[in-house]
Image: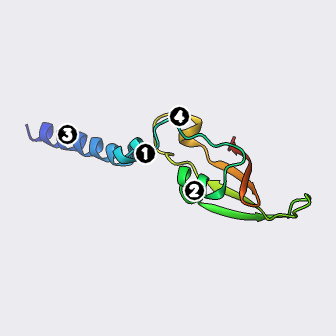
């Protein structure tokens, strides 16, 4: 009887530990950024991107462009937003790299 109770407690303990690792999407986050609705478009301003994705995790200055305006260039990196989700989808588990020329988005890609 005592060994069954100890075994049950061990099973419950391991079950709770496994649940602590999984961090599901918060309800508010799912409502404000439903899957598949984040749509970046070339030409968006930095403020438009921030309103869509929030502040970038990293901003790297790049060499100036060779155009007539000689504008500042930056790479914005957004680390994967939901790395602990049990799904293997680009918008869950991969970082995004955005390139700005001046104030406008000129290219973006997901990490491979």
Identify the mark nearer the N-term, 3 or 2.
3
* Front position in the image: 26 or 34: 34
Q: Nearer the viewer, mark 3 or mark 4?
A: 4
Q: Nearer the viewer, mark 3 or mark 1?
A: 1
Secondary structure under tag 1 reads: helix
**Separation (CA) of disc 3 from disc 4:** 44 Å
Q: Residue at x 47, y 44 (%)?
A: 84
Lateral position of residue 24 relative to residue 41, left or right: left
Lateral position of residue 92 relative to residue 28, left or right: right
Q: Residue at x 38, y 43 (%)?
A: 24
Q: Residue at x 46, y 36 (%)?
A: 86
Label 3 with label 4: CB-CB less than 8 Å: no
From the image, tell me which residue sits under label 3.
7
Disc ID at residue 32:
1
Identify the mark nearer the N-term, 2 or 4.
4
**Separation (CA) of disc 3 from disc 1:** 43 Å
From the image, tell me which residue sits under label 4.
36
């Amino acid at each position: 009887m005592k060994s069954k109770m100890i075994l049950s407690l061990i099973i419950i303990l391991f079950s709770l530990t496994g649940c602590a690792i999984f961090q599901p999407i918060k309800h508010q986050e799912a409502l404000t950024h439903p899957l598949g609705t984040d749509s970046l478009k070339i030409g968006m301003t930095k403020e438009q991107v921030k309103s869509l994705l929030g502040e970038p995790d990293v901003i790297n200055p790049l060499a100036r462009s060779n155009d007539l305006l000689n504008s500042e260039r930056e790479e914005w990196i957004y680390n994967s937003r939901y790395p602990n989700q049990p799904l293997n989808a680009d918008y869950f588990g991969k970082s995004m790299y955005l390139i700005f020329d001046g104030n406008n988005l000129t290219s973006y890609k997901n990490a491979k």
